[in-house]
Image (cartoon, rainbow, N blue to C red):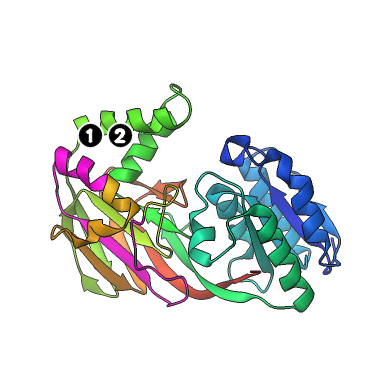
């Protein structure tokens, strides 16, 4: 793979497969850049990530991810902190980083915009969040880190084999609501102790997660800061009623919800596995740091 090639990571299962037929059109649009477009082979999330790392190490001219936030998460591990330009074609269920980064929502339009950016040699620097786990492992994310009740629900849903689709997540919510308990968090923001007892904690580089829920409604991936949203113990009923307000971001008006901004976040809590861009990372504690301009987005 040479420095003129565009390497493409595509997830045919993204968005429950509804964009499967669009891939040939996306590749054709990318080809209007005048570059050779090469599809990366991968049969698992782990092999997809390795393929992206290989392409970047070989000096590929650009890396493009076609899929949702899960596909983005795998690809961004390879381009973060490198000069390799990155393009994103939103074709998943959520597409939260794409929305926060100003990527066109239509996949073909996004591919056309990427091709134009490649031809013109331009890219836009965007922030990423860098997680260091308690074991010293490093993971990057673009949208939001879930580290509260939402993360617990994700962990439960991932252990369930039935039902399939969105209903599994809904059932996981009900099961976890039945055993809801506030947790004590160690939370340090730029060296200031903000330790608390909370039901919900999220650390956002972008505004939304879960397909448009504006958990961090004021987050901006160009400001060099992370937005931290903390919901104090709410109880089952209030937590359920709060969920619809996430769609509009008005939950932050509740006096029990507190918002902060910080460059570095240190967070820990017992029994919490963090999820970033919807992907399982590791058990807390984490150090999360905003890295300004860590990715060069083709948009």
Q: Position of residue 46 (x, y in %)?
A: 62, 44
Rendered residue at 79%/46% (across/down): 24
Q: In which quarter of the image is the N terminus?
A: bottom right
**Mark 1 packing: few (<14 Cα in 10 Å), some, or many (20+)?**
some
Location of residue 142 with respect to 17 vertically, above or below = below
**In magenta stretch: residue 239:** yes
Residue under pointer 1? 177
**Residue to which mark 2 is pinned:** 173
Residue occupying image coordinates x 18% and y 62%: 195
Is residue 275 rendered magenta in the image?
A: no
In the rendered image, the vertical position of residue 14 relative to residue 192, given as above or below: above
203 with respect to 182 (left or right): right
Q: Which residue is rendered at x = 35% and y = 31% of the image?
A: 170
Q: Is 66 drawn above or below residue 167 in the view shown?
A: below
Left or right: residue 122 versus residue 225 is right
Does the rendering let one see residue 141?
no
Q: Do the CB atoms of the residues marked 2 and 1 lie less than 8 Å apart?
A: yes
Q: Where is residue 80 in the image (x, y as percent from the top left)?
A: 58, 66
Magenta stretch, residue numbers:
214-243
Q: Which residue ends up furthest to the top in the rendered image?
A: 162
């Amino acid at each position: 793979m040479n420095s003129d090639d565009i390497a493409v990571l595509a997830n045919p299962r993204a968005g429950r497969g509804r964009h499967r037929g669009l891939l040939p059109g996306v590749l054709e649009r990318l080809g209007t850049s005048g570059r050779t477009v090469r599809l990366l082979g991968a049969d698992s999330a782990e092999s997809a990530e390795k393929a992206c790392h290989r392409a970047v190490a070989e000096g590929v001219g650009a890396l493009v991810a076609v899929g949702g936030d899960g596909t983005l998460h795998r690809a961004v591990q390879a381009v973060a902190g490198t000069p390799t330009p990155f393009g994103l074609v939103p074709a998943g269920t959520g597409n939260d980083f794409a929305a926060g980064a100003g990527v066109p929502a239509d996949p073909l339009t996004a591919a056309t915009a990427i091709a134009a950016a490649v031809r013109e040699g331009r890219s836009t620097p965007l922030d990423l969040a860098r997680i260091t786990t308690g074991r010293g492992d490093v993971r990057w994310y673009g949208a939001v880190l879930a580290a509260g009740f939402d993360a617990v629900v994700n962990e439960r849903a991932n252990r369930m084999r039935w039902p399939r689709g969105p209903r599994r997540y809904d059932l996981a919510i009900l099961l976890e609501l039945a055993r809801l308990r506030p947790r004590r968090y160690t939370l340090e923001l730029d060296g200031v102790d903000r330790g608390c007892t909370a039901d919900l904690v999220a650390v956002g580089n972008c505004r939304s997660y879960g397909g448009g829920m504006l958990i961090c409604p004021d987050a901006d991936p160009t400001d060099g800061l992370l937005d931290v949203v903390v919901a104090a113990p709410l109880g089952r009923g209030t937590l359920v009623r709060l969920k619809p307000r996430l769609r509009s971001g008005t939950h932050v008006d509740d006096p029990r919800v507190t918002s902060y901004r910080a460059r570095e976040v240190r967070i820990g809590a017992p029994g919490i596995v963090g999820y970033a861009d919807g992907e399982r990372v590791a058990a807390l504690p984490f150090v999360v740091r905003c890295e300004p301009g860590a990715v060069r987005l083709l948009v």
